Image (cartoon, coloured by chain):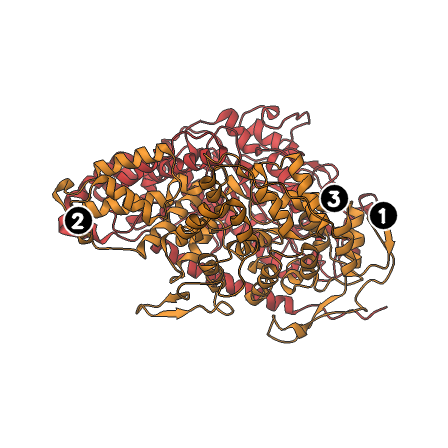
């Protein structure tokens, strides 16, 4: 069943810019070490490094926590405390050495969007998160079956309690529309699939929502009659519906187009989509072959001079934290992520987050600036740390190093240079201004318009 | 026959938990405001006094409208409400349209309930678990066969005052029961899934300005596609008083923002262009909202004449009333209810909360607008992406269905019922759905032509229907 897959050759594109593109869109930005290593080893090696990540010692750097009033760092309690699940995942994005795993887990969270707002216990979301991470570079078919049996999803889309006498269509509809097909089915298919998907039950007597023993599938609650889905007829059970969807001809192109959309603002070229679909199908619905096609496609590296995809807010934040060596020590990141429009575990609806330019409203932009302000609080320094003799050029170069040497447009460089020249030490006869210059340059490099795209 | 399991009471427990969680979330998010606007201690030091004075001058420059009046108020003993009325009067008097979205698909049939006749028979037969007894419903004068949901007293009050037009079974032909598809149609005002603009975004493209992002405000936590436009800038902001930039130990925020609005150049790629534009607009909006921030710094806005409910619905409408009263040139605005209307389960509790919240928020909003002398200019359209199936399900809920409920609120609206009954007599013909009686685009067209004064076809592409009489 698994045939040889033909991958496109690694494209011949300017290496440094291509590495920026790859490490940002497949992760949270390159580190200085990443840049150095793959300038030597090349783009192909960088792609394989991301696709075959290490599995031990993945997190490095200090453990996360929340500082209390006395400045003592309390460990996170992601299972129990509101918002700590968000911090827990943010910390993984900040500290991981397997960035594509976290980025794909985020993409799959968007794809199978489930929100704590509809769940009684955030442990359910963390359980689902583990499922998504396990298959982030794995097999989509196995994941789709896993999602059917995922407790968070069963609550979220009303599989629980969907009884043969009154099937609930919610999961059946989203399974086809959002998770696997997009088109190529009818309202009748949804109704019949909903009948097949009946029988999941929850033992309401108790407190622990994450206890697997309280979840079951009951033959008696399931509709045993014949159903007709996509023109096929049978006494389908829940897992049969997943297989029917996975084998539907609309599935591979739908999923591959969706996957592509997480990495590029443009439609995939027809040839690329064909390669992508064929790699996905020939590999038995594996994600790594599909991702390899994407990262080797020429179109992924379009517009290298001008980044053309808005960073999702949590990617923007985790990227800025990685670039500046900032770690999770405060719970303010939770409300800042809400303000930016993307708190993990709280997608706005089952369709996930509207991507790219939709992330940028004036208010969300302001929250991105506030997030940078909060990040800079972690790196606060007294005025006296900055010598009055620091030149404008040195101030700008230092601020760029602090911000992780980000991409900046020529227009930004020119305007920041002018600002650095104006806002000099001794301005207004006060020694505050050399320090203010450093602070403002750092803020604008991390929060300015160029920092919003990748 | 398999024995049915008992009614799932613990859903209520489940929901109680999520209400609790939302409370803690609000508590946590509420701390945001304090974090966002820390008072820069440096500004309070004697050495920085000169700078602070210079800053105030700039603020005065920016602060037209209410801000200047408020600064004056300390000396003149005018009440804040006098000031607000003056600021509103300074506006041009353009009509204003607000859309209020009930996310998830509101159960129209459970909001305006059949009490007698053929519809009642079908309703009782189809909803053995959810049917509300006629005596519990709130009467609708002149329509003994219909009644309001018992928790909808706010809507009842508006209706009885002649300020509520009710459009039963409003939808479009061949309704689509996907949240995303259907909401897309309602937001775009077309039946085109690939429409790139929203109906009020196109209105602003036709009749708005090219340089005032405050002309269209999503009083929400993110943008709203109702306002998606080709040219006209719009913005999203929930809480006007909190809208300001800061950076730690930076004294001269204005200087930082002067640079920010010039970063990035004039890029070609849409994403970069958006980033550059949105940074500039954020600064522009921050400057324009200076008066409202000043009002907050001086003790906050005056208490509204009627209390808003303590929910995001109430907060959004309260914030919107302040924005409308500040003379910012708002023409259209969108708001989203805090209610969760996708009642596949636990509908009785959820709908009770939703409708009580909605009615109370609208009543408070109308009173607030009147106090500000704005009520005559504002129409609020309340919409949801669809209604719900006539038959209830086994989870004390209802599934997605056709023919929802559309409401038009305001003193100028044509109050009353546009159609007098749900017409449930032949459910087989509609696959168990409420038959569609009104095309929502005929209501949009009525609002556009009779309230906003623009030909409907300029905003609704290819529109050739008969606009309903939405304005009296």
Q: State the image coordinates of residue B221 (x, y, percent, origin top left).
A: 48, 47
Identify the mark nearer the N-term, 1 or 3: 1
Q: Nearer the viewer, mark 1 or mark 2?
A: 2
The residue that disc 1 covers is A231
Earlier sequence position, callout 1 versus callout 2: 1
Label 2 sits on residue: A387
Q: Secondary structure at mark 1?
A: loop
Q: Residue at x 61, y 36 (%)?
A: A267
Badge 2 and badge 3 both on one subunit: yes
Picture quarter with the C terminus of chain B: top right
State the residue in front, A266 or A38: A38
Task: Give me the chain letter of mark 2.
Answer: A
Q: Badge 3: few (under 14), some or many (20 or more) residues near its Cα, within 10 Å?
A: some
Residue B101 picture location, percent across and down: 57, 45
Work out whether residue B179 can be spotted. yes
Q: Are marks 1 and 3 on the same chain?
A: yes
Identify the colour of chain A in the image: orange
Q: Which chain is red?
A: B
């Amino acid at each position: 069943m698994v045939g040889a897959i033909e991958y496109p050759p690694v494209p011949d594109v300017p290496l440094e810019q291509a590495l920026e593109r790859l490490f940002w869109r497949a992760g949270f930005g390159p580190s200085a070490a990443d840049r150095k290593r793959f300038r030597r080893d090349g783009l192909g090696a960088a792609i394989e490094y991301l696709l075959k990540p290490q599995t031990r010692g993945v997190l490095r750097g200090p453990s996360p926590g929340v500082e209390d009033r006395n400045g003592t760092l309390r460990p996170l309690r992601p299972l129990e405390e509101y918002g700590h699940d968000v911090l827990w995942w943010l910390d993984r994005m900040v500290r991981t050495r397997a960035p594509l795993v976290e980025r794909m887990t985020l993409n799959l969270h968007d794809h199978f969007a489930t929100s704590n707002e509809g769940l009684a216990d955030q442990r359910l979301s963390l359980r689902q998160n583990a499922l998504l991470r396990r298959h982030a570079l794995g097999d989509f078919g196995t994941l789709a079956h896993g999602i059917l049996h995922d407790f968070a999803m069963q609550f979220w889309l009303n599989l629980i309690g969907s009884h043969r006498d009154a099937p609930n269509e919610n999961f059946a509809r989203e399974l086809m529309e959002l998770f696997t097909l997009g088109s190529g089915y009818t309202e009748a298919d949804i109704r019949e699939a909903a009948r097949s998907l009946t029988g999941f039950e929850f033992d309401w007597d108790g407190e622990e929502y994450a206890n697997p023993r309280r979840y079951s599938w009951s033959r008696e609650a399931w509709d045993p009659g014949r159903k007709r889905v996509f023109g096929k007829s049978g006494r389908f059970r829940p897992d049969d519906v997943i297989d029917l969807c996975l084998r539907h001809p609309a599935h591979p192109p739908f999923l591959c187009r969706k996957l592509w959309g997480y990495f590029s603002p443009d439609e995939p070229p027809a040839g690329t989509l064909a390669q992508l679909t064929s790699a996905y199908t020939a590999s038995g619905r594996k994600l790594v072959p599909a991702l390899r096609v994407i990262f080797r496609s020429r179109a992924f590296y379009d517009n290298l001079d001008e980044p053309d995809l808005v960073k999702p807010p949590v990617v923007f934040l985790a990227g800025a934290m990685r670039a500046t060596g900032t770690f999770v020590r405060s719970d303010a990141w939770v409300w800042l992520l809400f303000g930016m429009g993307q708190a993990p575990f709280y997608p706005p609806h089952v369709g996930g987050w509207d991507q790219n330019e939709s992330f940028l409203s004036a208010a969300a932009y302001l929250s991105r600036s506030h997030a940078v302000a909060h990040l800079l609080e972690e790196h606060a320094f007294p005025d006296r740390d900055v010598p009055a003799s620091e030149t404008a050029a040195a101030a700008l170069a230092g601020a760029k190093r602090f911000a992780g040497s980000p991409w900046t447009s020529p227009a930004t460089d020119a305007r920041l240079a002018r600002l650095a020249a104006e806002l000099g030490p001794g301005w207004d006869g006060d020694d505050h201004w050399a320090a203010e210059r450093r602070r403002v340059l750092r803020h604008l490099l991390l929060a300015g318009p160029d920092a919003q795209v990748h | 026959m398999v024995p049915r399991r008992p009614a799932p009471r613990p859903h209520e427990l489940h929901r109680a938990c999520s209400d609790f969680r939302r409370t803690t979330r609000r508590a946590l998010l509420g701390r945001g405001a304090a974090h966002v606007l820390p008072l820069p201690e440096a500004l309070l030091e004697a050495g920085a006094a000169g700078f602070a004075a210079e800053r105030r001058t700039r603020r005065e420059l920016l602060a037209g409208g209410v801000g200047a009046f408020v600064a004056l108020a300390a000396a003149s003993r005018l009440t804040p409400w006098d000031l607000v009325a003056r600021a509103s009067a300074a506006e041009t008097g353009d009509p204003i349209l607000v859309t209020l979205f009930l996310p998830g698909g509101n159960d129209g049939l459970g909001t305006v309930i059949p009490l007698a006749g053929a519809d009642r028979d079908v309703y009782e037969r189809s909803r053995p678990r959810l049917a509300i007894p006629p005596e519990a419903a709130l009467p609708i004068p002149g329509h003994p066969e219909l009644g309001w949901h018992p928790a909808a007293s706010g809507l009842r009050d508006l209706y009885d005052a002649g300020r509520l037009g009710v459009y039963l079974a409003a939808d479009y032909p061949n309704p689509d029961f996907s949240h995303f598809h259907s909401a897309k149609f309602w937001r775009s005002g077309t039946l085109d899934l690939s429409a790139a603009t929203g109906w009020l975004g196109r209105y602003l493209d036709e009749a708005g300005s090219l340089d005032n992002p405050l002309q269209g405000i999503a009083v929400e936590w993110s943008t709203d596609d109702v306002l998606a436009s080709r040219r006209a800038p719009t913005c999203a902001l929930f809480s006007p008083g909190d809208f300001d930039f800061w950076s730690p130990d930076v004294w001269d925020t204005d200087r930082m923002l002067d640079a920010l609005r010039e970063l990035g150049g004039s890029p070609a790629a849409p994403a970069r262009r958006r980033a550059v534009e949105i940074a500039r607009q954020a600064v522009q909006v921050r400057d324009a909202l200076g008066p409202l921030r000043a009002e907050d710094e001086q003790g906050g806005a005056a208490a509204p004449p009627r209390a808003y409910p303590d929910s995001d619905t109430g907060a959004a409408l309260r914030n919107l009333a302040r924005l409308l009263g500040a003379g910012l040139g708002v023409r259209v605005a969108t708001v989203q209810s805090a209610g969760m209307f996708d009642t596949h389960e636990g509908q009785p509790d959820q709908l009770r909360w939703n409708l009580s919240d909605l009615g109370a928020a609208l009543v408070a909003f109308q009173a607030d607008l009147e106090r500000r002398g704005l009520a005559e200019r504002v129409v609020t359209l309340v919409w949801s992406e669809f209604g719900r199936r006539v038959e209830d399900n086994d989870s004390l809920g209802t599934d997605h269905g056709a023919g929802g409920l559309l409401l038009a609120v305001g003193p100028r609206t044509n109050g009353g019922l546009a159609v007098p009954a749900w017409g449930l007599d032949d459910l087989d013909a509609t696959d168990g759905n409420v038959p569609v009686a009104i095309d929502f685009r005929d209501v949009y067209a009525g609002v556009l032509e009779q309230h906003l004064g623009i030909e409907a076809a300029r905003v609704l592409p290819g529109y050739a229907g008969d606009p309903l009489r939405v304005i009296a």
